[in-house]
């Protein structure tokens, strides 16, 4: 073989090797590759090893959005052209944008979109630049939704905002073969003067709540003190009542004991003197008590009507003393 023949063979071999390498396409898992033949869509390559016709077949370049951070920590969003589409759920973190609320307050809003490509052919051929289209659609929808709300509602109704964004963006992106799973409003930043005013309002509200809490605590303490005094008075009254009841029971018991003793005494008198003797004894005893009471009064002088009455009275006393019953043991 001549030198020229060797050179030709080498060139042919290199050309065949290059064509073979170009005809082999390895697609990553959960990714697809769109193949065009002579400029027209031919087929979709799925994950794994695939063979295409070199020169005739070529992969379609698609825009891919990536987010990087610089040395200062600031986010930078780059769009590059790749030959495969990622079918996994993706996250687009869009930069904050100025939005006007219904009450004419300008705020900065930062949103994140979570989406997945469901139809790779539509995502490639129905929209020229999918990342840019999603960013523009999200920003426009965000301005429309927040523009219908006041600042207070915007700050307190993020779930409502997220739900409206998901519904609107998903309907529009459906024609691009994209499924929007959720949209999250990360941050809402009002102007500096509005922020200061809100801080003053929140400070005043905290002070008001502190005053209310202090007043409620004082009120509760007063109520507890009053309840304690009331319970003490009730306990004291109940103690006095119990003492009076006990004293009354003691007096009643003493009266019963005295009555029992007198009844026993009358029973003994009746046994010793009989019915008439007991009556005479009681009359004479009452008579003597009356004389004793009269004698205690220095201004009263007691005198019998006659000597006969005096004698009969003395005789009666003598008879009373002689007939008085003698208690057992005396």
Image: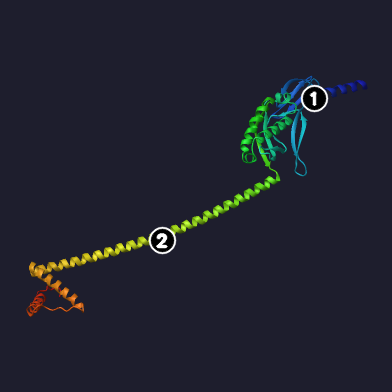
Quarter of the rendering containing residue 239: bottom left
Which numbered circle lies on residue 236? none
Quarter of the rendering containing residue 179: top right
Q: Is residue 21 above or below residue 92?
A: above
Q: Horizontal and vertical percent for residue 274?
A: 8, 68
Q: Earlier in the sequence, mark 2 or mark 1?
A: 1
Asked if labels 1 and 2 touch by Cβ distance under 8 angstroms, the answer is no
Q: Is residue 16 visible?
A: yes
Whole-angstrom CA distance, mark 2 to mark 1, is: 100 Å
Q: Nearer the viewer, residue 49 or 125?
A: 125
**Picture residue at 77% right of the left edge, 30% below the top:** 81
Quarter of the rendering containing residue 242: bottom left
Q: Horizontal and vertical percent for residue 249?
A: 27, 63
State left or right for residue 49 relative to residue 301.
right
**Picture residue at 76% right of the left edge, 29% below the top:** 63
Report crowding for label 1: few under 14, some 14 to 19, many 20 or more residues within 10 A (C-alpha): some
Residue at disc 2, secondary structure: helix
Q: Nearer the viewer, residue 125 or 27?
A: 125
What residue does disc 2 label? 232
**Picture residue at 10% right of the left edge, 70% below the top:** 280
Report crowding for label 2: few under 14, some 14 to 19, many 20 or more residues within 10 A (C-alpha): few
Residue at disc 1, secondary structure: helix
Which numbered circle lies on residue 22? 1
Q: Horizontal and vertical percent for residue 209?
A: 57, 51
Q: Is residue 243 above or below residue 91?
A: below
């Amino acid at each position: 073989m001549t030198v020229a023949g060797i050179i030709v063979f080498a060139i042919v071999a290199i050309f065949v090797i290059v064509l073979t390498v170009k005809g082999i396409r390895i697609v990553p898992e959960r990714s697809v590759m769109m193949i065009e033949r002579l400029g027209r869509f031919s087929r979709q390559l799925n994950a794994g090893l695939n063979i295409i016709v070199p020169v005739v077949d070529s992969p379609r370049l698609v825009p891919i959005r990536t987010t990087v951070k610089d040395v200062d920590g600031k986010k930078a969003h780059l769009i590059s052209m790749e030959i495969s589409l990622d079918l996994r759920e993706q996250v687009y973190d869009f930069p904050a944008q100025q939005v006007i609320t219904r009450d004419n307050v300008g705020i900065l809003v930062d949103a994140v979109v979570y989406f997945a490509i469901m139809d790779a052919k539509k995502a490639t051929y129905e929209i020229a630049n999918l990342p840019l289209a999603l960013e523009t659609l999200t920003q426009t929808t965000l301005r429309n939704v927040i523009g219908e709300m006041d600042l207070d509602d915007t700050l307190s109704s993020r779930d409502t905002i997220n739900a409206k964004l998901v519904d609107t963006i998903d309907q529009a992106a459906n024609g691009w073969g994209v499924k929007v799973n959720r949209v999250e409003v990360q941050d809402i930043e009002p102007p500096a003067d509005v922020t200061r005013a809100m801080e003053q309002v929140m400070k005043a509200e905290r002070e008001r709540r502190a005053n209310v809490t202090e007043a409620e605590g004082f009120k509760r303490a007063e109520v507890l003190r009053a309840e304690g005094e009331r319970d003490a008075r009730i306990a004291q009254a109940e103690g006095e009542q119990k003492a009076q009841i006990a004293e009354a029971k003691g007096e009643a018991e003493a009266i019963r004991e005295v009555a029992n003793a007198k009844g026993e005494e009358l029973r003994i008198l009746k046994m010793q003197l009989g019915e008439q003797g007991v009556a005479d004894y009681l009359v004479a005893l009452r008579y003597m008590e009356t004389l004793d009471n009269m004698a205690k009064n220095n201004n009263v002088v007691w005198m019998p009507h006659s000597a006969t009455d005096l004698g009969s009275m003395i005789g009666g006393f003598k008879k009373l003393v002689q007939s008085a019953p003698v208690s057992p043991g005396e």
